Amino acid sequence: MTNNLFKSTQVLRSFKSAPTCAVSFYKRKLSDKLIPFSSEKGRELFRSSLKQQYMENYFSLAEQFHTQQEPAFCGLGSLSMILNALQCDPNQVWKGVWRYYDENLLMNCCVSGDQVLTKGLQMEQFWCLSVCSGLDVQLFRNSTIEQFRQHIIDSCKHQKFHIVVNFSRKALDQTGDGHFSPIGGYNPDEDMVLLLDVARFKYPSYWVSVEKLYEAMILIDKQTNNKRGYFTMRPSENASSMFYRL
């Protein structure tokens, strides 16, 4: 044991400079209209929402919170997070004896991997992949803000009903444009939602007002010339329960 300790010491001495965990700014900064989840105000909103039982969907999502693997994988990352949170079985063993969803398992239906890697997912492709994975999913492009808010409330009151939004980052003073991420909670006092941003290397999770997020969703996607929108997602009981709404 003494000999091993001596060797370890020699290896450490061979480093010209030991690596350090330097605290530096490497992410994008959130605008003042958004409240970081980990901030004092963000935690206050969390406690208030939890007390009022508007965080029922949060815990299963938090257990499976996923960072997208590639810059264009926000759609795949959000979908794999939802599928794992709902405990959907991919019926495929691919990591030892374990069966779980990952972006790589979602590129065998509706879209090619090369296309997603360069262009990301369009909303119809996200819907198609969700259906292929056994979800009851509805796409909403032209909802009113009242309908959107009600879906948020319904989702945040249940453990197995989730919402993924597709919005323009530009409307929230963020860099980039189209982005997918799940909603993880609602605060009725401030009318704000907790957005669990899957691009965790870029932005943290944050609270955003329903109004601001709605405005970011109804902007036109230049690739499709359609509005953006959101998806309601549940485990599917049968194929006839799946809808697509323009």
Image (cartoon, rainbow, N blue to C red):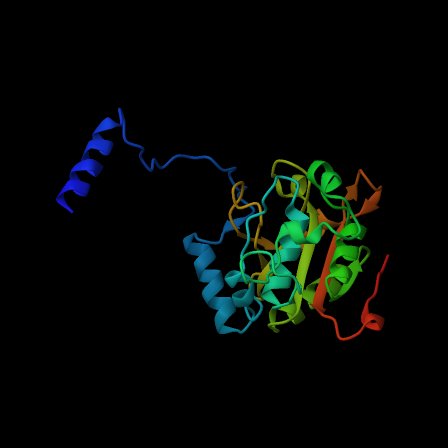
Q: In this orientation, does residue 212 appear? A: no
Residue drawn 44% across and 53% down? 38
Task: From the top left corner, tell me how far across and down residue 56 is, in percent.
Answer: 56, 71
Asked whether, in this view, residue 172 is left or right of residue 52, the answer is right
Q: In this orientation, does residue 108 appear? A: yes
Residue drawn 56% across and 61% down? 190
Asked whether, in this view, residue 194 is left or right of residue 7, the answer is right
Which of the pair 120/186 is nearer the observer? 120
Task: From the top left corner, tell me how far across and down residue 64 is, in percent.
Answer: 54, 60
From what the image shows, is residue 202 above or below residue 103? above
Q: How many marks?
A: 0
From what the image shows, is residue 115 above or below residue 77? above
Asked whether, in this view, residue 34 is left or right of residue 146, the answer is left
Which of the pair 18/120 is nearer the observer? 18
Quarter of image, res 133: bottom right
Residue drawn 56% across and 54% down? 196
Residue drawn 64% across and 62% down? 83
From what the image shows, is residue 18 above or below residue 95? above
Quadrant of image for the C terminus? bottom right
Q: Going by the picture, which residue comes out furthest to the top?
A: 16
Task: From the top left corner, tell me how far across and down residue 81 is, in percent.
Answer: 60, 58
Task: From the top left corner, tell me how far across and down residue 245 is, in percent.
Answer: 85, 60
